[in-house]
Image (cartoon, rainbow, N blue to C red):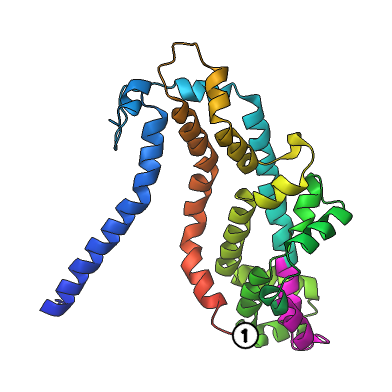
Amino acid sequence: MKRLDKSELIFTVIAHILVGVFAIMAIYPFIYTVSASISGRIAFERGEVFLLPKEITFGAYQYIFNDKTFWITYTNTLFYTFYGTLYSMFIAITGAYALSKKRLMFRRQLNFLLVFTMWFSAGMIPTYINYVEMGVNNRWGIVVAFGVQAFNVILLRNYFESIPSEIEEAATMDGASEFNILKTIYIPMSKASIATVTLFSGLGRWNGFFWSRILLNDTNDVPLQVYLRTKFEMLEQISDEIGGLALNYSIEAIIYGMLVCSIIPIIIIYPYLQKYFVKGVNVGGVKG
């Protein structure tokens, strides 16, 4: 085992301390949210909850589980995330594969148009009018209208360009079609980059708020994030709804409980994709 000299040892110690501090800063808000959601009303209102819960009660979660609208919007968000991510990845993978080929007619112009959309936009009002005219006011409209992200296509295109062309040439000589080449060569060899882009797309869909709130007319179609914002704004009304009852939990515990429930799928899925994250971004961003 290599022995570190004094300067390297000091750097290693400082680096570990800083990483530890950043990790604590990142995880503390989540721990506090969980603790506040199961703490008693008196302890919370007195400001006694800092890290661990006080006077543990699950009354807030009972209220959440009985809130049908919360679970309807939760299901909507799962719908938007699952189908939206599938659609986005289909567009991103096929588009990136085509744009990575030098034999593609007008390839340079198409790549320029793709990047141009990242530099300039029509503005919020023209974009809104465009969505309204196209009838983006339902579930599938949201899935399709926000299916393409230029940055994700560029990441995958750069990764595909890094794959040796000799592999494709050998497959072509064996009679493989474009679809088979994409399926058997490019996708398996690009798992890190695809996982990274999938994570980007999935998080974007899960956190979608602004356009869903503006475009969706039916309240039964709105995602969880829109409902949470509305619920938070109606904090006083929530207090009136459950007022007069001898509650042992605070109104804020309901809010924190909803936040905990809304982040559970991300906590479950993220560890499986995180190992690909750094590698995918680095390799995907090497070639321009």
Q: Which residue is mark 1?
A: 164
Residue drawn at 55 percent across, 19 percent down: 240
229 versus 185 height, above or below: above
Task: From the viewer's side, name the closer residue of 52 and 137.
Answer: 137
Q: Nearer the viewer, residue 77 or 178?
A: 77
Tag 1: residue type? Pro
- For the point 57% across and 36% down, the residue is 233
Residue placed at 63% from the left, 31% from the top?
71
Quadrant location of residue 193?
bottom right
Which corner quadrant of the image does residue 50 belong to?
A: top left
State the quadrant of the N terminus.
bottom left
- Residue 84, how many percent across, how many down? 71, 53
Check the image and report above or below for 190 versus 244: below
Hey, which quadrant is residue 153 in on the image? bottom right
In this rendering, is residue 42 above or below 98?
above
Secondary structure mostly taken by the magenta-highlighted segment of the chain: helix
Which residue is at a point 58% across and 31% down the rendered structure image?
A: 234
Magenta stretch holds residue 277: no
Q: Is residue 185 visible?
A: no
> Horizontal and vertical percent for residue 225?
61, 43
Q: Residues within 10 Å of mark 1 (few under 14, many from 20)?
A: few
Above or below for 127 versus 254: below
What is the x, y in percent for residue 90? 74, 62
Query: In the rendered image, is residue 205 in sight?
Result: yes
Highlighted range, magenta: 92-114
SS at circle 1: loop
Residue 121 horizontal/vertical position (percent): 72, 71
